[in-house]
Amino acid sequence: MVKNPRHEKILNLIQNFRHISVADLTERLGVSQVTIRKDLTKLEDLGLIIRNHGGARLAQSVKPIPPIISRKRTFYEQKDRITSRAVQLIEEDDSVCIDAGATNLLLAEKLTSSQIRVISNSLDVLNILASSIDVTLTAIGGNFRASAGSFIGPQAEDSINQLQFDIAFIGTTGITARGEFLTQNAIEGRLKKDMLKAARRKVILADSSKFEARAFAKFANADLIDILIIDKGFTHTEQFRDLGIEVITV
């Protein structure tokens, strides 16, 4: 988490405008260009922004994300089996953190009659569970990332860091052979990491197409993950178990 309040303001501005100049930041924050350049260097070192001539942009993939409905249909059978198995890890009265993403949306659809508390930053997940009379729902707010349907940023991170969960279900864009878990947006990755740290059990939900898929930013190493639920197309089960991850194939 970024602890410097000025750095948080810079991240918020870059997230809102996608690109912002050093001159604009200097005027908005009332500090010198030298200070702003030092701030941008620090944020770039953290992997949160990319500096370019005269300013900076958010550290994220420029490849457009398909709509969540189309992502939900892709590898649907695998996602359905993965989320059905994930439900079995949840006990009555658990506090359950559900990340944004197509697989987690399918998970939410299976939980509408569960006596649990759900905490989520996903607008889609919140909408699915809003009418449930059984689920106690807590929304994590922040800056809305429309392409992912998620709320992210310092406000969301502050909210997560005040909570503890029995279990967290986190999606991933890519998985490396070294047991690294990746996402397309560095700021979203920070929130995923905070969610994992706040959970007693830390679970990644992913279909096997995510293995060695390219993504922009790393949000977790193997030592932060307890369980990976993935379909039988994944062929590195023993390798990941050697890394300390319980691998459940479905």
Image: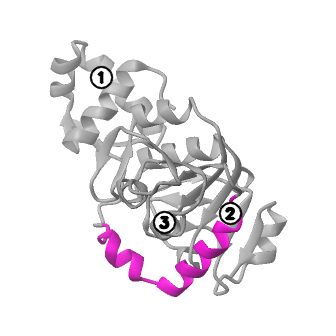
Q: Nearer the viewer, residue 115 or 126?
A: 115
Badge 3 amino acid: Thr
Circle 3 or circle 2, nearest the eye = 3
The magenta stretch spans which residues?
65-90
The circle drawn on residue 168 is none
Whole-percent x, y for residue 15 in the image? 28, 41
Name the image colouring.
one colour
Q: CA distance from mark 1 to mark 3?
A: 32 Å
Give the crowd class for mark 2: few <14, some 14-19, many >=20 residues within 10 Å: some
Image-based side of 55 in relation to 225, left or right? left
Question: Do we see residue 177 in this rendering?
Answer: no
In the rendered image, the vertical position of residue 187 relative to residue 78, given as above or below: above
Badge 1 amino acid: Ile
Identity of the residue drawn at 23% across and 40% down: 16
Circles 3, 2 touching at the beta carbon (< 8 Å): no
Identity of the residue drawn at 49% across and 23% down: 3
Give the crowd class for mark 3: few <14, some 14-19, many >=20 residues within 10 Å: many
The residue that mark 2 highlights is 179
Question: Do we see residue 9 in this rendering?
Answer: yes
Location of residue 102 (image quadrant): bottom left
Residue 87 among magenta residues? yes
SS type, badge 1: helix
Whole-percent x, y for residue 68 in the image? 34, 69
Q: Which of the two labelled residues, at mark 1 and mark 2, occupies the earlier sequence position? A: 1
Q: Which of the two labelled residues, at mark 1 and mark 3, occupies the earlier sequence position? A: 1
The circle drawn on residue 36 is 1
The residue that mark 3 highlights is 173
In the picture as drawn, the residue positioned furthest to the front comes out as 133
In the rendered image, which quarter contains the C terminus? Answer: bottom right
Whole-percent x, y for residue 121 in the image? 43, 48
